[in-house]
Image (cartoon, rainbow, N blue to C red):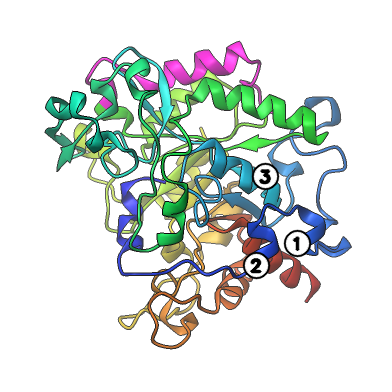
Amino acid sequence: MGTQESNEETGRTGRRALLGAAVLGAGGAVLGMTGTARAEAPRHGGGDPRHGGGVKSLPKPTIVGHRGASGYRPEHTLGSYQLALDMGADIVEAGDLVPTKDGHLVCRHEPEIGGTTDVADHPEFADRKKTKLLDGVSTTGWFTEDFTLAELKTLRAIERIPANRPHNTLYDGRWEIPTFEEVLKWQDEQSRERGKQVWIYPELKHPTYFRKQGLPLEERVAKLLRKYRKDRRTSPVILQSFEPTSIERLNKLVDNPLVVLLSSADSRPWDFVETGDPRTVADLVKPAGLREIASYAQGIGPTLDLIIPRDAKGNLTRPTTLVQDAHRVGLILHPWTLRNENPFLPANFRKGTDPDAYGDVFGAYRAYFATGIDGVFTDQPDTGLLAREAFLAD
């Protein structure tokens, strides 16, 4: 997910070892996965064309490791992705795709990398620090499009929100920035080693911004997917973007499952701003907007507040009709993002007054799963899997 969810990431939280065994890299057996939770899992692993795979073969509710297991490791690193798989995530969001100066795709939360790498500690790159207008927002830092891939490979990833997850800083400097091509190779390696198909869920970041710089994302993504024969309807790669026109463009280039990400109801996709389209997300989630999305995409990724709004005190209210409306036109829903820490949860699922503590995240999962969503993005895949197990056992 992108900057659209930055409002979820305020406050101070400390990471808690809710499921110690899982955090140590335990697999499904240690997580206590029962037959109930496994019942909907495809026998041969989701997405293998030889066995009729595809999005509908995934377990439901699908647990998507948000930027890997980002509650436990610096996000968008092979370490974070690997841990998400070890914990049993159905899909790994690997990764948020942004380009380098020489046209390679790399995995970073944003093109600005001052907060996710040690670039500030590299005096040789001090003069690369700039202020740019990124989707209408003045942003200061170091940007991937100003670096070659070779230069970026000299950097190391760090925890993006150390005030929230200080324990993750233990792993600062352990991993480099992965390229999308490296992720595709890693996906194949992991599929072979695990004997089942590994799924990934990359996001195209700021496609209009990069197209105007002569670094279009869609064609680069499509070229790599074709190279690795992962551009098919049953391929284990779901593509997503906050810009509907980017998804429309991808629909003409590849046959992969496609998802339109949706932020707050009053926001406008940046491609709409650039083209003068007056519609907001509130328009896109109406039946007519959903029908239009269904003409070129297979799903939507709404913010959780579009599923169940919160009141002025931050408590959950009544669910909207979005799940039913989307299903009616054949769209799946994978909303974002559930996190264990109190500040990120609805107020009625927080525990105590400690802003660093874990809240009643299982209660929150239960409320969202009850709406009929097809899956959810989570920073802590182990927690999501246990929540699904409990929900399906009820």
How many numbered discs, if any? 3
Depth order, front residue of 155/5? 155
Instruction: Classify residue 317 by image quadrant.
Output: bottom left
- Tag 3: Cα neighbours inside 10 Å, few (<14), some, or many (≥20)? many
* Callout 1 crowding tier (Cα within 10 Å): few <14, some 14–19, many ≥20: some
Q: Which residues are magenta?
A: 210-234
Q: Which mark is residue 85?
A: 3
Label 2 to label 3: alpha-carbon separation:
16 Å
Amino acid type, label 3: Leu
Question: Which of the pair 327/179 is nearer the observer?
Answer: 179
Residue 111 part of the magenta segment: no
**x 36%, y 79%: residue:** 314
Q: Tell me if label 1 and label 3 are in contact, CB under 8 Å.
A: no
Whichever of callouts 2 and 3 sits on the residue coming sooner in the sequence is: 2
Q: Secondary structure at mark 1?
A: helix
Q: Is residue 353 visible?
A: yes
Residue 350, percent across and down? 46, 81
Q: Is residue 188 left or right of residue 171?
A: right
Residue 102 drawn at (x, y percent):
32, 12
**208 is higher (above) or lower (below) than 199:** above
User: Is 273 left or right of 225, judged from the image as shown?
Assistant: left
Q: In the image, what residue occupies the spot 16% across and 26% down?
A: 128
Q: Nearer the viewer, residue 360 or 233?
A: 360
Q: Position of residue 94 (x, y in %)?
A: 53, 37
The kind of residue on which mark 2 rests is Leu
The answer to whether residue 196 shows anywhere in this view is no
Closer to viewer: mark 2 or mark 3: 2
> Which numbered disc covers residue 199?
none
The residue tagged 1 is 31
Badge 1 or badge 2: first in the primary sequence: 2
Residue placed under numbered mark 2 in the picture: 19
